[in-house]
Amino acid sequence: MEHQKDSKVWFITGCSRGFGRIWTEAALERGDKVAATARRLESIADLREKYGESVLTLELDVTKPGQAESAVEQARNYFGRLDVILNNAGYSLVGTIEEASIDDVRAVYETNVFGALSVIQAVLPLLRKQGHGHILGVSSSLGLESLPVIGYYCSTKWAFEAIHESLAAEVSAFGIKVTLIEPGAYATEFGSPESLKMAKALDIYADFKGQFVQGLKALKKGDPKATPEALFKVVDADQPPMRLFLGDQSLPSVRKAYNERLKSWEAWAEVSDAAQGEANILR
């Protein structure tokens, strides 16, 4: 792991609140430069007033691919290069698998999955030309295990994880690094109305959902302001990890989930092996 030598240029989505705002300001405070984006430009206008020419504020709705291409081009023209791409924009859809409409599910995928893809595809030609760059994707510990009531949100993060794992293998030869950032529960605005969409409720699930929500409220939540240093260690590392948990709750939970999966696979291994058969390929 190396200490930071030169300032970095970041391109960050979802900078108006939560982790996006905290990480943007932390990067600027440490002397880096940031292309900060948000759906509403006025929500990040104060960054320009506070940090001057070190920050470029851009309007970006990640569900509109043309805007991603334009924002990336403007950022490159302004700073001359981009070193770190941080895909942070996203929201949660709350509802059981039965309750959420297909339109609701499509909409959460448009932001959480296709929105991130639009930024990645817009920036890759530039990073290849530069011969360097680091793509950070903000996933979740729920990209590794799923919960009820927010299953569709979890599914977007499972897709997000697979895309970044494939991406890492595809672009490493070009000097491009990829890391998935996987926060656990944090005291951010992620639970606010702007970060949640509620599916139409069915009475049959009311008690189950009430118990689930109470369980979430009881979770130990981390301090989001304690997270920037972890990101800086990742982007300053010669060999950054493919995945990084934020917080101390995720590893024990995911370890338990994976142990249960392995136990189930192993218990059924005889059935699985028998299904291999012996293929008789005619040539």
Image (spheres, helix red, strand yellow):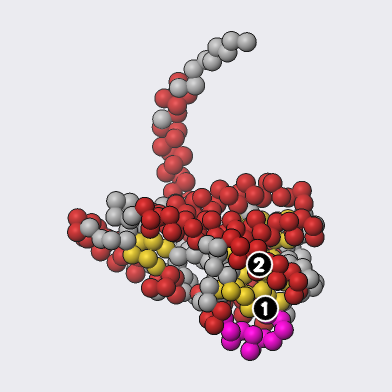
Label 2: state its secondary structure: helix
Relative to the observer, which residue lies in front, 113 or 246? 113
Q: Residue shown at 19%/55% (left/top)?
A: 204
Question: To which quarter of the image does residue 150 belong?
Answer: bottom left
The residue mark sitting in front, 1 or 2, is 2
Judged from this view, the residue extending furthest toward the bottom is: 49
Q: Residue shown at 52%/15% (left/top)?
A: 278
Label 2 crowd bin: few (<14), some (14–19), many (20+), radius 10 Å: some
Residue with the mark numbered 1: 56
Q: Residue shown at 61%/84% (left/top)?
A: 47
Question: To which quarter of the image does residue 266 belong?
Answer: top left
Quadrant where the C terminus lies? top right
Residue 120 placed where, x, y %? 64, 58
Seen in the image, is 261 located left or right of residue 78?
left
Residue 226 placed where, x, y %? 56, 75
Question: To which quarter of the image does residue 177 belong?
Answer: bottom right
Q: Residue shown at 64%/85% (left/top)?
A: 48
Region of the chain picked out in magenta, as a range:
44-55
Residues at marks 1 and 2, CA–CA distance in whole angstroms: 13 Å
* Relative height, residue 152 to residue 53 (above, below): above
Residue with the mark numbered 2: 70
Q: Is residue 187 visible?
A: no
Seen in the image, is 7 located left or right of residue 62?
right
Label 1: state its secondary structure: strand
Q: Which of the marked residues, 1 or 2, is nearer the chain's N terminus?
A: 1
Is 206 magenta? The answer is no
The three-letter amino acid code for the residue at tag 2 is: Ser
